[in-house]
Image (cartoon, coloured by chain):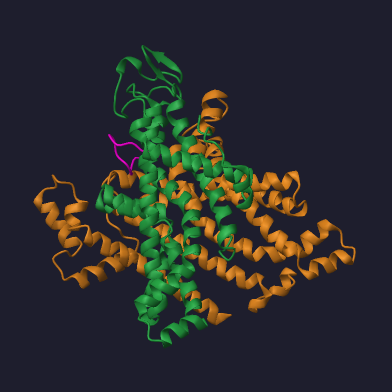
Amino acid sequence: MATLETPAPAQGRSASLGMSPVVVISTAFLFFMVCVAVFAEWLAPAHFTTQNLAARLRPPMTVQGDFTYYLGTDQLGRDILSRLIYAIRTSILIAVLGTLIGAVVGTLLGFVAARLRGLPDQAIMMLVDTQAAIPALLLALTMLAFFGNNVVLFIILVSLDGWEKYTRLARGLVVSEQTSDYINAVEALGARSGRVILKHLLPNIVAALVVQATLNFPGTILLETSLSFLGLGVQPPGTSLGLMLGEGRRYLLNAWWIAVFPGCAIFLTTLAMSLFGDWLRDRLDPTVDRG
Amino acid sequence: MLRFLAVRTARAILTLFICVSAVFVTLRLAGDPAEIMLSVDTPPDVRAYYSQLWGLDQPIYDQYIRYVTSALRGDFGISFADERPAFDAVVEALPNTALLGSAALLLALAIGLPLGILAALKHNSAIDRLAMASAVFGYAVPVFFLGILLILLFALKLRVLPSAGSDSLVHLILPVVTLGLPLAGRLARFARTSTLEVLGKPFIRAARGRGVMPIGVILRHALPNASVPLLMFLGIEIGNILAGSAVVETIFAWPGVGRLLVDSVATRDLPVVQAVIITITLIMVSANLLVDVLHILIDPRLGGFGRASGAHA
């Protein structure tokens, strides 16, 4: 994949951020992927559903007329490069939405548990324990069986991966922050609960939550791509990296490129994100569990 | 210790109970069970039969009690796909998943543990970097992509291993490697961190100072102390193995519980889906409980039978 062409940031800046070359490359790659997702229409040589039955299952670098299939074509003669670009958009969009929903809901529950304590706390933590006991992929599969597949449900299901981690983290941090002198002082001065949460508690724990989100993002991408790979996530005529890989699986013998390019895109994205997340954790928040 | 065990057991049962209840609630939220679970062209009299069987004409709490008691008996209804009890299908598939999962776990232990321990002993060496790289790989590689690459290489290019099926143990090789390799990477990182931590403790330095050989230090002192976190780690990984088996079994057509779940989700065979998810929860909860019990037995600080393990605290 020709994906590492983005210029690395200037040397002086990267050195001051404590970035190793590997982290610089990872960050540049992630930036590149986001650009691909945002500018998919302009970057893709063709639309992802455009078929050309005269050029089915062509290998990469096939030239057909004045059109070059840089990454080959699939079983319907669709340009793999164009499909890949749109698939990156779908997969990143779903993973970002899933991460946001999981982070917001999880954090909110953590705050509720920590502020109210008592029965709500017990109930929320019991939910957290139950979620932690069942792998998110299996839970998502079950929900899909019950409710059938639709986009909104799918995004919510993707957010299932990891919400309980934010709840645990936020609850733990808020419980310990609440006993600190400055919170006591603010509360003694008569600040309302909402003000304490928004102006004092949240700013103090947001770094840890952001780190958690970055570390969780690869898992969310893998959940989306796994479900789509199994044919239970994004449905045709839509496209996603997992769906492309799942479709390509059937043509492995004759056309390895259909499956291998989206697979590489998933792998490199999760890899870059974990390396970036590790770096961010060391920079921002050395207290997060290294698990 | 007994109190700790009692609390843990109660929590395990509670988790399982919440799960069964959640399935019941979700099923009712999704709509009329007879509507969802039976196909559109089901004759009215069959529909009425099921409606009575599930007690759909009864009040909701009655339905709930009925559901929980039948779930306890392992009765989740009849599979639509092959018209036999759903639970039988799960019981039939379970040994295959157990075989796949434990083989993958063994492979991961055989590769990951020595690699991680060696990496800790030779801190900042080439082998240390190899261990860390394999760990990053283990966290980032999608199992389905790894499986496809292995099929491409060993089944289609080299033609030395079968890509799908379950006729012989040879068929087990690719799925086990696919499931086990990423786990080995994660395990290596974990073993490295735990070993480094233990190696920094005073009693290790004391042992070294007494002239105990490095390998003796590792076997006699470091390993028993690193075994508790390792146990915790494996407890968490059981979930990953089960989730991974859904994907791996589907790719390699291995007739286990994971593939059964994926297939029955695709055909919306709800009795089987319920039977699978409750069984998996039961496995997870029991595994976590087992980890807790072993933890007590290994760790002398918890008042178990720690003297036998030779651990130093």
Instruction: Compare residues B235 and B13 and report the one nearer the observer.
Output: B235
Q: Can residue B140 be seen in this view?
A: yes
Instruction: Compare residues B230 and A237 and report the one nearer the observer.
Output: A237
Q: Which residue is drawn at 60% across and 48% down?
A: A13
Instruction: Compare residues B109 and A256 and report the one nearer the observer.
Output: A256
Q: Chain coloured green: which letter?
A: A
Q: Main secondary structure of the magenta part?
A: loop
Q: Is residue A231 left or right of residue A6?
A: left
**In the displayed image of the protein, which residue is found farthest to the right?**
B211
The reply to whether the magenta stretch includes residue A233 is yes
Residue A215 % position (x, y)? 50, 54
Q: Which residue is drawn at 71% across and 63% down?
A: B197
Instruction: Compare residues B3 and B80 and report the one nearer the observer.
Output: B3
Residue B40 % position (x, y)? 14, 46
The reply to whether the magenta stretch includes residue B280 is no
- Residue A111 versus residue B174 in the image, above or below: below
Q: Which residue is drawn at 64% across and 66% down?
A: B228
Q: Color of chain B here?
A: orange
Q: Is residue B14 visible?
A: no
**In the displayed image of the protein, which residue is found farthest to the top?**
A65
Q: Is residue A244 left or right of residue B155?
A: left
Residue B75 % position (x, y)? 31, 60
> Image quadrant for the C terminus of chain A?
bottom right
- Start and end of the magenta stretch? A231-241
Residue A81 % position (x, y)? 40, 28
How many badges with numbers are in the image? 0
Q: Which residue is drawn at 47% across and 59% down?
A: A210
Q: Is residue A161 left or right of residue B201?
A: left
**In the displayed image of the protein, which residue is found farthest to the bottom?**
A188
- Residue A44 versus residue A103 in the image, above or below: above
